[in-house]
Amino acid sequence: MLETLVTIELPVGESYQLKRHRFTPTDESLNHGKRISIVSGTHGDEVEGIYVITMLAEWLKVNSDKVRGTIDLYPSLNSLGIDSITRTVPFYQVDLNRIFPGNARDTFPNQMAFGIVEAIKGSDIAIDIHASNIFLRELPQVRIAATYAESLVPLAKKLNMDFIWVHDAITVLEATLAHSLNSLGTRTLVVEYGVGMRLTPSYGQQLLTGILNLMASEGILAMDTLPVREPCYSDHGKVYYINAPAAGIFVPAMDHCQLVHAEQLIGHIHDPYGVHDPVPCLTPGRGVLFTLREYPIVYEGSLIARIFDDQTGVCQ
Ligand SMILES: [Zn+2]
């Protein structure tokens, strides 16, 4: 059932609408009572999540007989941003994922945030899908604030992702949708993969398998669980950041997401004026390269790559 949950009129004659597609069992007596929300489009320049939700909706239409709970799909939280290829909320230049839980009596973006939390809260599980940004390409990963690691890591392992990254809680994370929902008792996983403004269909298929597996293992879908990959887990090693040593154009020397060894060439930074020789960017040690610069213009200090050094040997 397609529903419009929130409508906010804008001064320019447009309106913001929050829509969701809800799937429930055709026979309500088969509903085991669990509710999961799959959301994307908080950032209007990220389309990977919209694609995976599209595929999930198509799968659920064909397999409606397997539904044993409430499955809510929200493909485009910041629909105005998606319409205008804008990461933030248009006109306000506000990052929606920095103002949760919002406020019904505040500015328009705050009203959006408030309406979104009101719609999703009460779900048992939520999956908030992000696609990095236009600057960085990411290996399929789940990001979890350390505060919630104990309850979220077991769920994250079911999602068929390559990497689980547990962060220390920092102030800015407290204004995210995931933090708001987790603090309200909805176990919320943040998934990041791919790159802004683009689709990586193979990653989308990988996450779709993971979401179906998670729903099967939670009894929301009546089917066997699916085989999923064993993710690398940041608790078992260290994450290294590689920043640009100089400004210029970064030209990668490797594909994304691969095992690397120490002192391997990631790419060169070239000086467009040709005054300076190209500067090589090297890996500091062995590990999994899980973030790689996509947008070529860099300044000194720009993030070039992130590498996870697994110390248990799982990620070989
Ligand atoms: Zn995002």
Image: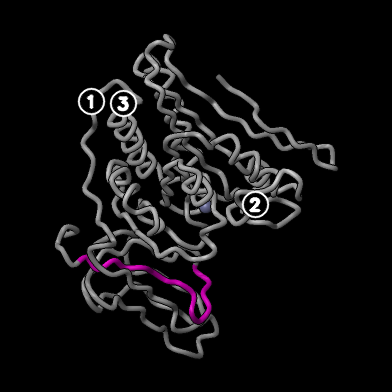
Q: Residues within 10 Å of mark 2 (few under 14, many from 20)?
A: many
For label 3, the residue is 219
Amino acid type, residue under disc 2 in the picture: Thr
> Camera-side residue: 57 or 5?
5
For label 1, the residue is 224
Q: Is mark 3 within 8 Å of ligand 1?
A: no
Tell me the residue at 31%/64% (across/down): 289
Q: Residues within 10 Å of mark 1 (few under 14, many from 20)?
A: few
Disc 3 secondary structure class: loop
The x and y percentages for residue 179 are: 50, 52
Disc 2 secondary structure class: loop
For label 2, the residue is 86
Disc 1 secondary structure class: loop
The x and y percentages for residue 9 are: 79, 37
Amino acid type, residue under disc 3 in the picture: Gly
Tell me the residue at 44%/29% (across/down): 35
Asked whether residue 300 is drawn in magenta, I would say yes
Outermost residue on the front side: it is: 184
The x and y percentages for residue 12 are: 84, 42
Q: Quadrant of the N terminus?
A: top right
- Name which of mark 3 and mark 1 comes first in the sequence: 3
Tell me the residue at 32%/54% (across/down): 164
SS majority, magenta: strand
Instruction: Kindly report which numbered mark, 3 or 1, lies closer to the viewer in this rendering.
Output: 3
- Name which of mark 1 and mark 2 comes first in the sequence: 2
Quarter of the image for residue 172 reads bottom right
Magenta extent = 296-310
> Camera-side residue: 315 or 312?
312
